[in-house]
Each structure stands twice: as C-alpha cells, then as structure tokens.
Amino acid sequence: MSALQQLPLGAQSFKIIRQNGDLYVDKTRYLPELRKMGSVVFCARPRRFGKSLTVSALEAFYSGKKELFRGLAVEECMNSAEFQPRPVIKLDMSAMPLFRGFDEFQEALSRRLHKIASSFELTPCSSNSAESFGVLLEDVAQKMGVEPVILIDEYDAPIFKALSNPRLLEGVREFMRDFYSQIKVASDYVHFAFITGVSKFSKMGVFSSLNNLYDISLDHEFAAMMGYTHEEFGNCFQPYLEGLSKKTGIAVAELPGKIEEYYNGFSFDGETLVYNPFSTLSLLQRGFFDNYWMESGSTSFIRNFLREKNLTVDQFRNLPVQRSFLTSPGEIESTPPHGFLYQAGYLTLRKRDDGYCLDYPNFEVLSAMSAYCIQNMIHEDYVADELFKNVQAAVAKQDAEALVKVFNRVYAAVSYDDHRVNSNESFYRATLQTFLLGAGIRAQAEVHNNLGRMDIVARYKDKTVVIELKRAADAEKALKEAAAGMSQMLEKEYGNACADALRLAVAIDDGKRRIGAYNYIPAGSSTVIEGGDGHFLR
C-alpha cells in the first residue's frame, strides 16, 4: 500500500504544494475560464476557503510554470500554441499592517510596489500615492512588451482592520478607491485583473470607478472553484478515512455521512454544495471532529456581535432574501445583521422555488453559533461549558431527571427582560434547542412523523431523546400539562420510529419560568413515570 500524500492544511502556495507532492484537489480547469468573464473579475469567498491558493495557482499559470501543472486539467491548455505567459503583479492586501495608523499602511504598500518594480528591473516610483500603482502597470507593460496580469488577494483586509476606527476607515476606503481606480486608468496596459475578498462590503464604494468589473461570486459556473464538492471529496479523500476511522472509532462506512453533516453545505449559487476545505483537512489530519473553521476566526468578535445586536440562532433559519440583497449588500456599517453574517460566511445561500433564503451551512457553524448565544446568555464561559458537558452526559445516559435539572439551570440564566418579552412556548423551545446544539447535540425542532409533529428530537452519539414541551400558568397546571404532553406523545406515536428513545414531556411553569413538571418513558420501556417539581438548581 502506497503512502498517503501529505494534506495541505494551511498551505497557500500552489508552487510548494506541487513541488512537495502534497495532495491537491485539481481546480485548474477554472484558471483560463476566468479571463473569459472579463478583463477585471471579482470573487468573494469566506476566510480560509482557498482564495489565496487560487491566486497562487493563477500566478503560476500566467507565469508559465508548466512543470507545476503536469497531470492537471489545465496542462493541455498551457501546452497549446495559443498560450502566452505574462508578467504577474501580485498584491496580498492582508499583509499590509494598520496597527500604527494610515501612514504605516501606505508605507508597507509602497515597499511592496517598490519590490515588484525592482523585480522587473524598473526604477520604483518615489511617491506613496495611489497613482504610483498606475505608473507601475504602465512601466511593466512597456518594459516586458506584453500587458501584465494583476492579482489582488483579500482586497477588503484593510477595511476590516480599520473597522473600529471610523476616521481611519474612511481614510483607508478613500485611498483604496483611488488605488484600485488605477486598474481602469491603466486599462490599456492590463491584460487581466483578478480580485478576491471575504465580502462584497465596500465593493461598490472601493471599486465604484471600475465599471467593467465582473463579479463571479454568485455564478453557477464558478460555484465549486473553492471548497470541495461531494464528488471531489470521494475521489480525493476516501483513502484517508481508514486512518480517521481508527482515531474516531467510527466505522469507515459511516464517516462520509458524518463529515458531510459537519462540514459540507456551503453554497455560493444556492444550488452547488461544497465542503469547507479548512475544516475537512483539519479533521483528516487531527483525527477528531471539532469546530475548526469557526474557532480559527475571531470568536470574541462574533460573540460580541451577537450579544450587542441581541440576536438569536433561530431567527436566521431559512431567512428569505432578495437577489438584490445578495449582489449589493451595501457598506458594512449599514448592512442588517444577516447581511454581515452572510458576507462573513456564517450564513449560506439556499435556492428555493420562490427565490432565495439564508441558513447555516452545516452542523459546525450551527453548533458554534448556538454555543456563542448560550455563552452570552449565561455570561460565565466555565458555567456554560459545565452545562454543555452535563447535558451531553444526560443525553448519552438518557437520564430524564438529569436533563430536567440542566434545562432548568439554562432557563434560570435567561434574563428577566427576555422572559418578559418572549414568554411563549416557541421561546422556551428555541432556547432548549439552541442549548442542545451548542453542546454539540443534533437537535431538530418540529420533526414530523405520520401522525404529528415532535417539538425536539435530540441525538448524541447513538442515543435519542424525544421532547414534547408544554406551557402552564402555574405549578398545579404544569402537572396537568406534563401529563397531557405525554398523552399526546403516546397518541401520536412520537419516538416510536427511534429505536430505544427516551420520551420526555415537560411543562413550563410560567410563574417560576422553569420546568415545573415532567413525565417520561425510559428507553426500551412502555411505563410512564411522573416527575414532580423540576428540581431547580441554584
């Protein structure tokens, strides 16, 4: 058996991946197609999704490094008589610092332009102005006798770095607008420009003068250019599943479905689904499931965003949006919360018969966002972590009493104002589902069977808990509602299709804002057991 290729986790250099013989999922068929879209092409994708690797592959392609493309889809194109290598000007805007202010940023960008000029044996322009970029484009074309290709990676990185400083933000935005306008000013000296970014925020402002810019972010033709399709995953990563099975204890046959649930689901056209490349590679290399992509970003920023906007997880499920919102989200300061979450990759696109909607791409994102909301609600992370572990253990043991105890601790953490405004059955159900999801438990709400609709079905490892939730005005009525909930479960045969499921009916006591009574049927039993007071724990 031959050794497996090294996984390119964190690798952004196409050249190094190919020279080292690391695994590369062949996306090169897209490279020559980009130029056919126009002379200036823009593509937005979330962080850690392959933008820099795509730019690096384009650099090698236009530089004519044929040896790096042997055996890949674009090899034939590069060997054709029509193929013409070109000088490449590449800028990574995420490498430009802004810690000490705007001058530091300008100086770093100027140094980079000077280095590029020197590589072509040109005299660098002494000015730090945006116009020096246009001068460089013209000088390179005249020196080399052929128009260059411009590659700009993470165009919006300076914008995001300046977000906390409005004055600096406006200065950076104005300078970048002038800087990128040089692509149009020097258009006679540019063969092709490809620009990437995390979002479309500021695209209209920063690129307002580039009236020939073509945005492929939503195009079906390029929907799988970054990320892994289901077919690519099967073709390229199947050999790695045996080793992953040994580390996780999960059968090889079961792993593809679990990986798909965790890391697939991103869509940039509403139809084509792709796996998150960073999380997929992290799983295969490290050998256990985790929220790799979510934890690789600024978790404190997104948590604060959710808290300051008073956002819940449930409000962004299957959220209808217009196509105009997708193409022109506006500036980052004024976009609605779902606009920011979509552009940042926390929500993804789904196409429906009546248009488009937003939703969480997969279990990783949904679980992490749920955990952030619960942590914000409880305030103390160590308490939230303890509750997550407790509910995992309770579901794994199918322990009804332990579940009620931990549920009531969560309800106790909900602020008085939230209870006062949202005191209804759907609020209690959504809080419970968010908590379970945050603990890494698959919790589906309003699950249909042939006779009715179950409030929550929770699955963790190989255990299932079916929950029916009722609401009552006081403790006495809660006892009746818990019994009524269990009667409904029996009548509607809730949980019958789940082998050895724990069936739990709980009733909220509105007066105390917690579970006041519960009935349950243990897994593998048909006996109904009545629970009295909900065992509130301080």
Image (spheres, rainbow, N blue to C red):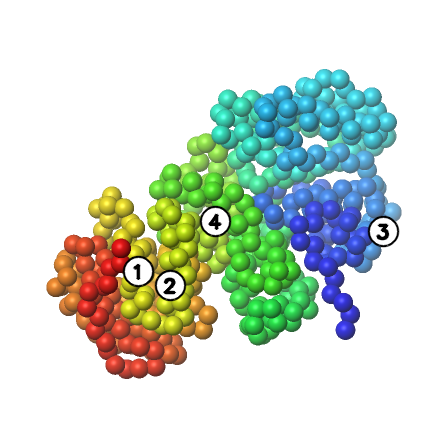
Q: Residue at x 49, y 30 (%)?
A: 164
Q: Which mark is drawn over residue 145? A: none
Give the mark nearer the N terminus: 2 vs 3.
Answer: 3
Q: In front of the other: label 1 or label 3?
A: 1
Q: Residue at x 78, y 36 (%)?
A: 88
Q: Nearer the viewer, mark 4 or mark 1?
A: 1
Quick check: marks 1 and 3 in contact, CB under 8 Å?
no
Residue 497, how many percent across, how many down?
37, 77
Regarding residue 256, the answer to whether it shows in the image is: yes
Q: Earlier in the sequence, mark 1 or mark 3?
A: 3
Q: Amino acid at mark 4?
A: Leu
The residue wearing badge 1 is: 407
Residue for badge 4: 347
- Which numbered circle lies on residue 391? 2
Label 1 with label 2: CB-CB less than 8 Å:
yes
* Amino acid at the residue labelled 3: Glu
From mark 4 to mark 1, how far is it between C-alphas?
28 Å
